[in-house]
């Protein structure tokens, strides 16, 4: 096994800590998965104005990659724009522009045919000023360090904005989970857990599911960690969230991100002049986030009229049955072939006239061409970083409101926090309690964004970053920067 780390640190700021060795395993399968459009695969020209986002003295100071399509540069660029507007101290800009720890491991796993294969895994710990590192694990054949860095950065911002006592982290394994047997995935996940076991923990870094991973994988991680880690007898199962309810998972966690998307829409749509009861919705991606957003928004009276995933695009102007479509996807692996709709082309999907468009697939899927095609009033970002700066500029020019990911999809980590609290107090909450508390956090976060937008006269994404940065700034003011 190979391990590469940038300076490991346990302290909140630059506090150095000792590097640790590593150990071993756990995972699950599900519906067929996506052939992800590789980020930056289609180079785009930044329209006028977005160049400003692409340039910043901090990029030069920290020797960032110069490619404007680089996802990490794009996500940090949005934060720096907000940081400049609120006059965030320079030292906080540079601290937040880089993750504290970047852990990369290589580990061998025996396949069902007896041969060994070597896998690559990541855990990036972006910041822990507000609490333990927190964030999902992505199992995808195309996962890269820059993706994981970007996603861990977004977790720091999201946890701060939504008011949960966590920092940000993210990880993943370069693997297509749908091409392995359940037994192979279990060995891969358990072996990966062993490789990073010294770098995670219930009070230090708490992984969760993301694209390609699920509650069964979390169960294997929790079991492996509890079996091999020193001191894990105490709350060892709390090392991950998104677990099955049988072993300490929370009611409402599976639907939480979709629930949070819809809670955000309910709070924000009235000021945009859209009535959720009569609105039309299209959804890109129909996995966990997309399908739960679809089901819950339909239960509120909206009509889901178009959906696209990696298997194709479908449309029904009278409204799809979002619940039946979720069952179809679980059985067949995608939306293609769903009887209650007509197959349409990709461009037609984007051009479908709706009130709300929910991207809930992968990063950087709304670039300039898609932004020009979209025919909606609101983009509610269920996915992380689905809109590129160039795409966003087009949306702004066309008067389309964007509800940013760090607000819109914060429901998942919020209920993960509730799961962690339930594990630590050995007290299981009722679903009503989970939903009510989630709603409170989502509304408070939406109002924080709205207040910042009014104060700084900026767009909602910048306002969301300001809301997140205000809390981080206060934490650093009180804690100071070691030594
Ligand atoms: P998932 O694996 O359950 O679903 C992903 C969906 O994207 C699938 O429907 C897949 O078909 C679709 N997709 C993949 N590639 C595509 C392509 N090229 N074209 C069209 N569709 C494609 O993943 P998920 O958990 O729903 O996560 C989706 C997004 O939401 C990710 O950005 C993730 O980081 C983010 N997110 C997830 C959670 C959570 O709790 N699961 C929380 C916050 C944010």
Image (tube, rainbow, N blue to C red):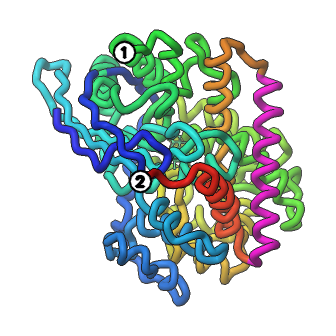
In the orientation shown, which residue stands out farthest toward the bottom? 48
Q: Residue at x 59, y 54 (%)?
A: 476
Q: Is residue 321 visible?
A: no
State the mark number for residue 99. 2
> What's drawn in magenta, residue-wise?
431-457
Q: Residues within 10 Å of mark 2 (few under 14, many from 20)?
A: many
Measured from the top left, where is residue 181 in percent x and y?
30, 22
Asked if the magenta segment contains residue 438, the reply would be: yes
Q: 99 or 269, which is in the foreground?
A: 99
Q: Secondary structure at mark 2?
A: loop
SS assignment for the magenta stretch, majority: helix
Above or below, comparing residue 41 to residue 230 in the picture? below
Image quadrant occupied by the N terminus: top left
In the orientation shown, which residue stands out farthest toward the left? 115
- Name the quadrant containing residue 16: top left
* Left or right: where 439 falls relative to 426: right
- Name the quadrant containing residue 124: top left
Q: 129 or 47, which is in the foreground?
A: 129
Asked if the magenta segment contains residue 374, the reply would be: no
Instruction: Say which of marks 1 and 2 sits in front.
Output: 1
* Left or right: where 161 falls relative to 193: right
Q: Is residue 259 visible?
A: yes
Measured from the top left, where is residue 234 in percent x and y?
50, 12
Residue designated by label 1 = 230
Measured from the top left, where is residue 286 in percent x and y?
57, 44
Measured from the top left, where is residue 475 in percent x and y?
63, 51
Q: Residue at x 52, y 77 (%)?
A: 390
State the mark number for residue 391. none
Any atom of ligand 1 within 8 Å of the CB at mark 1?
no
- Name the quadrant containing residue 297: top right
Q: Are marks 1 and 2 in contact (CB under 8 Å)?
A: no
């Amino acid at each position: 096994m190979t391990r590469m780390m940038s300076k490991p640190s346990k302290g909140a700021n630059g506090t150095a800590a000792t590097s640790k060795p590593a150990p071993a395993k756990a995972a699950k399968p599900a519906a067929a998965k996506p052939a992800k459009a590789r980020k930056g695969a289609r180079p785009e020209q930044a329209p006028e104005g977005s160049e400003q986002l692409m340039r910043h003295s901090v990029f030069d100071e920290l020797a960032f990659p110069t490619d404007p399509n680089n996802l990490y540069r794009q996500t940090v660029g949005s934060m720096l724009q907000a940081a400049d507007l609120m006059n965030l101290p320079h030292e906080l800009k540079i601290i937040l522009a880089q993750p504290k720890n970047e852990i990369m491991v290589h580990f061998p796993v025996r396949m069902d045919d007896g041969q060994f294969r070597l896998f690559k895994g990541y855990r990036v710990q972006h910041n822990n000023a507000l609490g333990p590192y927190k964030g999902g694990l992505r199992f995808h054949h195309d996962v890269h360090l820059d993706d994981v860095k970007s996603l861990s950065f977004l977790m720091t911002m999201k946890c701060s904005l939504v008011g949960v006592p966590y920092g940000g982290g993210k990880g993943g394994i370069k693997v297509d989970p749908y091409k392995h047997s359940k037994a192979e995935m279990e060995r891969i996940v358990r072996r990966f857990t062993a490789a990073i076991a010294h770098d995670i923990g219930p009070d230090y870094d708490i992984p969760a599911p993301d694209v390609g991973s699920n509650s069964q994988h979390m169960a294997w991680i929790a079991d492996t960690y509890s079996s091999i880690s020193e001191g894990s007898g105490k709350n060892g199962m709390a090392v991950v969230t998104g677990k099955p309810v049988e072993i300490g998972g929370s009611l409402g966690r599976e639907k939480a991100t979709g629930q949070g998307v819809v809670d955000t829409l309910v709070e924000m749509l009235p000021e945009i002049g859209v009535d959720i009861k009569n609105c039309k919705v299209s959804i890109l991606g129909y996995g966990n986030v997309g399908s739960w957003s679809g089901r819950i928004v339909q239960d509120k009276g909206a009509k889901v009229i178009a959906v696209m995933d990696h298997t194709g695009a479908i449309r029904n102007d009278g409204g799809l049955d979002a619940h039946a479509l979720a069952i179809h996807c679980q059985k067949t692996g995608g939306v293609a072939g769903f009887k209650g709709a007509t197959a349409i082309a990709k461009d037609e999907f984007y051009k479908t006239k709706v009130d709300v468009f929910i991207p809930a697939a992968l990063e950087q899927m709304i670039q300039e061409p898609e932004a020009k095609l979209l025919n909606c009033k609101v983009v509610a970002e269920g996915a992380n970083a689905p809109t590129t700066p160039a795409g966003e500029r087009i949306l702004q020019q066309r008067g389309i409101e964007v509800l940013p990911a760090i607000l819109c999809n914060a429901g998942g980590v919020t209920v993960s926090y509730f799961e962690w609290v339930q594990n630590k107090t050995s007290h299981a909450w009722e679903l009503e309690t989970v939903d009510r508390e989630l709603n409170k956090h989502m509304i408070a976060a939406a109002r924080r964004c709205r207040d910042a937008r009014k104060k700084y006269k900026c767009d909602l994404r910048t306002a969301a970053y300001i809301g997140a940065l205000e809390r981080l700034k206060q934490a650093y003011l009180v804690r100071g920067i070691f030594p």
